Every structure is written in structure tokens, then in C-alpha cells.
Image (tube, rainbow, N blue to C red):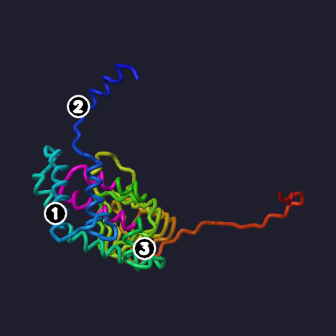
Amino acid sequence: MNDEFLAHLYQEHTHTRHLVPASATCHFAEAVIQLLFPPLSEKRYTSLEDFKEHTHYLQHSLKQILDGMVSTLSEPPEFLATSVMNALPRIHAMLLEDADAIAKGDPAAQSIEEVIRTYPGFKAVALYRLAHEMYRLRIPLLPRVISEFAHARTGIDIHPGASIGEHFCIDHGTGVVIGETTIIGNSVKVYQGVTLGAISVEKSMANIKRHPTIEDHVIIYAGATILGGNTVIGTRSIIGGNVWLTESIPPYSRVYHHPQIKVRKAPEPEDVLNFSI
């Protein structure tokens, strides 16, 4: 690299505000999930006081991250850090419901502990619920850092702005995309490769609802794509695999995609060489 290019990069570094330490944010998010779920924890505590001290350390860590972003915050760092930690009992309760939904929805799951330890759908939802709380508190950037951390770990991309109800189940999960203004009701189950996305809109329309609404007790099978802010999937509907939907359907609907697959038996060629080495 020549000196002119290095000088340009140096100026870029000088003028960039390092407001969000991504590694510290991801470490905080992972530590919170481990705090909430002992099967995931890599730390052992010697007493209740030791446990409380670690919890205070996490809150202080978040405050330190927020201290570096103070000019962009709507509330003081200490207030926001306290608010996030105070929300953990509610987040914990919701995640236990999510783990229960996965355990009941997957015949292969042997226990809730197995779900918590190993299921990427649970991991993605756990990080989403923490990120969503920060999003709700209007903390900038950190929620997206956490959601992208979850995306990289699980292949599941949930925008922290999405609103997801109780008892949410993601089965398998890789390839699931849930957009910012999606609204998902209670007891919804989605499989891998499902997209809840937006129809292409102008940038100026970014603040409108662009993603679909999924009402309670809906099941969406693998590869289905549901688009549009005005699209509502009525309660207790079932969306089959690979369905493409851009319009609303009423409650109790069944929507299936029927590909035309033709199977023909080819004539056996006479000149096939069968040999082994």
C-alpha cells in the first residue's frame, strides 16, 4: 500500500466514532443468556453473593458500553442499563415458554434442557428477545449488533424491531428471515427457510409497516415466503412449504403449493458398462 492510501485510511480512522464496541456487546449478550440458563453457563458460582456480584458486573459492563454512546442515547446510560437488567425476569419467563414450544413441537426433542443447550432456534430467539428489549428502549445499534451475532451463530436472521408473541417455535431454523415490522402472535411455529419480508418499497417508506402480520397458532412450513405490510395470515392457518404469499388470508386457511413433478422411467441403455475395480 502506498503512503497516500495509508494516510487516507488513517484519516478515516481518526474521524470515525467508535461508539459501539461490537465484541463487548456480543460478550455481554452471550453472558446474559448464560446467566439466565445454567445449562449454557461456563461459569460456576461459589455463593449467592458471588452470583449477585456477577450480575452487577454485567450491568456495569452494559453501562460502560453505553457510556461510549452517550451522545446518541435518549436516556442516561445508567437508566438504560438498569432497565435492561430489570427486564430479564420477563425475558426469562418468555424464553422458558419458547423452549417449551420447541420441545413440544419437535418429536426429536428429548427435554427442555436439550432444547436450551442445542437448538439454534432457541439460541436465535433468546438473543432476539434481549435485542428487542434494547430496541424497545431506543438504544441505537446494539440491538442490530446482537441480532447479527445471532444470525452468524444460527443462520436465523430476526430483526430486533419485530414483535413476537409468546410460545414461539422455530424448528431447525437455518434460513429464517423475519423483518423489522413483522408482527407475530402467540404459539406460532415456523420451519427453516421461511421469509417474513417486505415487498420492495421506496427508501422514504422505511417507517411504514412493511412486513406481514402472523396471527396466533399459525404454522408456516419450510421455504414459505410471506411478504408485505398489509398481509395478514389469519389465526390457526397453515402455510405449506414453498408457498409465496403477498395477500391476506382468513383464519383457519390451508394454503399449499403443488409443484408439477413428473417421474418417467427411462429405457435401460444397452451400452452401459458395469464394472468394478
Write down the quadrant of residue 179 in the picture.
Answer: bottom left
* Disc number for residue 53: 1
Vertical side of 200 occupied by 128: above or below: below
The magenta segment is 121-147
- Rounded to the nearest whole Å, what is the CA distance between mark 2 and mark 3? 49 Å
Q: Quadrant of the C terminus?
A: bottom right
Mark sitting earlier along the chain (1/3): 1
Looking at numbered disc 1 in the image, what kind of residue is underneath it?
Glu
Which of these two is toward me, 94 or 215? 94
Residue 128 located within the stretch drawn in magenta? yes
Mark sitting earlier along the chain (2/3): 2
Write down the quadrant of residue 131 in the picture.
Answer: bottom left
Question: Badge 3 is on which residue?
Answer: 219
Question: Badge 2 is on which residue?
Answer: 15
Q: Name which residue lies at 26% across and 50% down.
A: 24
Vertical side of 152 occupied by 111: above or below: below
